Image (cartoon, rainbow, N blue to C red):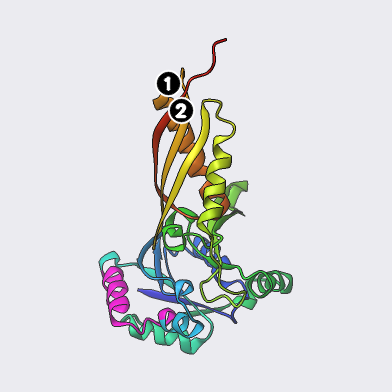
Amino acid sequence: MKITSLVGKSGTGKSFQAIGLCTERGIDYIIDDGLFIGHGTVLAGRSAKRQATKVGAIKTALFTDEEHRSEVAAKIAEEGPEALLIVGTSDRMVAQIAERLGLPPPQERIDIESITTADERRIAGYRRHELGQHIIPAPTLEVKRAFSGYFLHPIRVLRDMQRGRGAATERSVVRPTFSYFGKFSISDKAIRDIVEVSARPIRAVESVDSVFVSKRPDGIVLDMQLICRAGDTLLGVARTFQNAAKQNVEDMTSMNVLAANVRITDLVWEDAG
């Protein structure tokens, strides 16, 4: 197995550049911030960016927890990659990760400054230190479940390939739990307001009677009750509202809506006269 390291200071754009580097060099697997990523899929591990403190994040990135380490090491052995990229802030960090996971030392070292410009690193630093944005080198659908409600959105990059053809890759932007910007939370009232607004364009919905929000580690469950106008197909009305509420809550909060349950509790009969 050939191990390549990508090394650079925090906030210099390593995770953003990792996918493009792997594409150019034919590397299908990445170790970054506690995650084992292969072929654009999070295969094992837990993200350092979900830890409650900066110290906890560092420990996770170094695989100091035995259960975490064993899970990732076993998955690497199962996949049997021919080449793997380890992303780290220093040569020492990369060496520690490789040793913890039972991997050979890196045979090739790439400095982030050798593959980026000063402007690219400046922009990366601004996103990290001023906006609190961190990149995970995997598509949003792969990491969304673990980052419910943490400003997660994709960055799609089109890279030039041979003969004028291009290949699109996707990274995910998150705001870590340990961000110095402060604790982030979304109130139940804000979610209820989004649900009520979602009903307004639907003529057959008279009003949203109630919205109950059940929060879980990987997302939320919505239990919604409607008062509808008689005369429309109620199943169709419920499905239209269900889809609109789920989509709007996910778009506006970045939370995973695990279930959106709709119950029609009453009907309003329009006055024919």
State whether residue 156 is above or below residue 1. above
Prevalent SS, magenta region = helix
Give the number of callouts: 2
Choose between 117 and 75: the one closer to the eye.
75
Residue 43 as seen in the image, left or right of residue 230 = left
Q: Which residues are magenta?
A: 60-77
Q: Tell me the number on the disc at residue 253.
A: none
State whether residue 189 is above or below residue 199. below
Assess whether mark 2 and mark 1 are in contact (beta carbons under 8 angstroms): yes
Circle 2: is it few (<14), some (14-19), or many (20+) Cα within 10 Å?
Answer: some
**The C terminus lies in quadrant:** top right
**The N terminus lies in quadrant:** bottom left
Choose between 3 and 12: the one closer to the eye.
12
Element under label 2?
A: helix
Could you tell me if residue 128 is visible in this image?
A: yes
Circle 1: is it few (<14), some (14-19), or many (20+) Cα within 10 Å?
Answer: few
Tag 1 residue? 233
State whether residue 263 is above or below residue 185. above
Q: Residue at x 63, y 75 (%)?
A: 12
Q: Tell me the number on the disc at residue 237.
A: 2
Choose between 168 and 228: the one closer to the eye.
228
Could you tell me if residue 169 is visible in this image?
A: no
Picture coordinates of residue 208, whole percent (x, y):
50, 38
Element under label 1?
A: loop
The amino acid type found where label 2 is placed reads Val
**Can residue 212 be found in the magenta stretch?**
no
Picture coordinates of residue 57, whole percent (x, y):
46, 80
